[in-house]
Image (cartoon, rainbow, N blue to C red):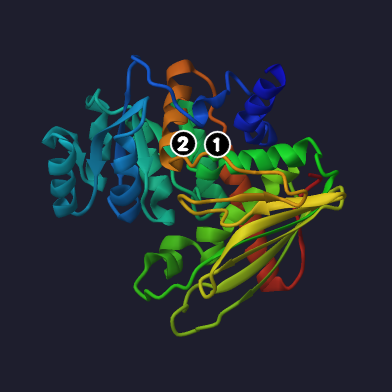
Amino acid sequence: MSKLLDRREFIAGALAAAAGVPLLGTRLSALSPQRSTRKQLGFALVGLGTLSRGQLAPALQRTTNCRLAGLVTGTPASAAEMQSLYGIPDRSVYSYDTMERMADNPDIDVVYVVTPNSLHADHTLAAVRAGKHVYCEKPMEVSVARCETMIAAARQAGVQLGIAYRCQFEPHHLECVRLAREEVFGKVQEVEAGFGFRMRDAEQWRIDRQLSGGGPLMDLGIYALQTARMLAGREPVEVSAVQSNADPEMFKDVESDITVTLTFADGLVARCSSSYTAPVNSFTARAERGSFGMQPAYSYAGNRGWRSDGAPLTFPQINHFVAEMDDFADCILTGRQTRVPGEEGLRDLRIMMAAYESAQSGRPVRLGDG
């Protein structure tokens, strides 16, 4: 039983250790939240697009530590529909220009930023000025400098800033981290990870560089980068990248496909691909005595793991959004640091900016000593 508990605690906390975050009280509650009678923190959703309407708002009805308490939007009709559906009072509905008025609203504890990438800093800073904790969709922002501004503002205000890396709460991913960190198949020597789909909507904000900061790397490739970094348990020392554009008319501002190669100090190499032209959703870790991975790896549900020795890598399916929001609320309620702080978002941004630099110059970019 003690070995089983140790293994489960490792699964629940492995990625926190990989990111350099203290494992303060990390247990299976992050994977299967238990009902409690303590206070539920009020979450306000900033941006009422598909993710908020289709995933986050419904998930907040299933959380243990959270509840939907506010809405921020530039589209009054969207707010009215959600107000009616979830019983949100008029006093808890804001426009982007009035977010700072949340300072006078004790019903709202956390602001979840779900707007286009280049607006994350503006909306985070507004929430911080209102004295609210912030959970921000990935990528954190579109530049290193803007990420640093967000981190500094949250630190100065004494609030927590978390980045929505949902896979860091998904049990199949956490088990793969355990396999890598405990060297069950020996040292991991190579990682291949990819996430992509066929983009068909030419009006998507995700292909407008001013809003997105880049193409599939910013949107999907960040998942593959996270996989490589978390399996490695350390930071890469060199980044190289090759990008292409399969449809210059549609992808006027951003790449349609990109492959990023991360090199680590001990020789581990990770090839991370992302695409708006081809479906891919998997990763493979090759080690000295075997391999393991997931396919699909990054979907909201239905992800599956595998091991080359045939042993099962199967866990109950969970709602990623319930898990990540409950964990962030628990961090605030207990005073522990989130495993996905702003610094984690900043690490990914540095890698992605280096990848774009490499793709433009045709040369690898050194990052540091790992």
Determine the secondary structure under disc 1.
loop
Q: Which residue is mark 2?
A: 324
Front in this rendered view, residue 219 or 285: 285
Figure check: 127 above or below 347: above
Please report the residue visible at 36 percent of the width from the left and 31 percent of the height from the top. Answer: 63
Q: Earlier in the sequence, mark 2 or mark 1?
A: 2
Please provide percent x and percent y for residue 70.
24, 36
Please provide percent x and percent y for residue 77.
14, 53
Please report the residue visible at 47 percent of the width from the left and 34 percent of the height from the top. Answer: 161
Please provide percent x and percent y for residue 162.
49, 36
Q: CA distance from mark 2 to mark 1?
A: 9 Å
* Disc marking residue 340: 1
| Location of the C terminus (image quadrant) | top right
Contact (Cβ within 8 Å) of mark 2 with mark 1? yes
Front in this rendered view, residue 85 or 17: 85
Quadrant of the rendered structure where residue 357 is? bottom right
Please provide percent x and percent y for residue 12.
60, 30
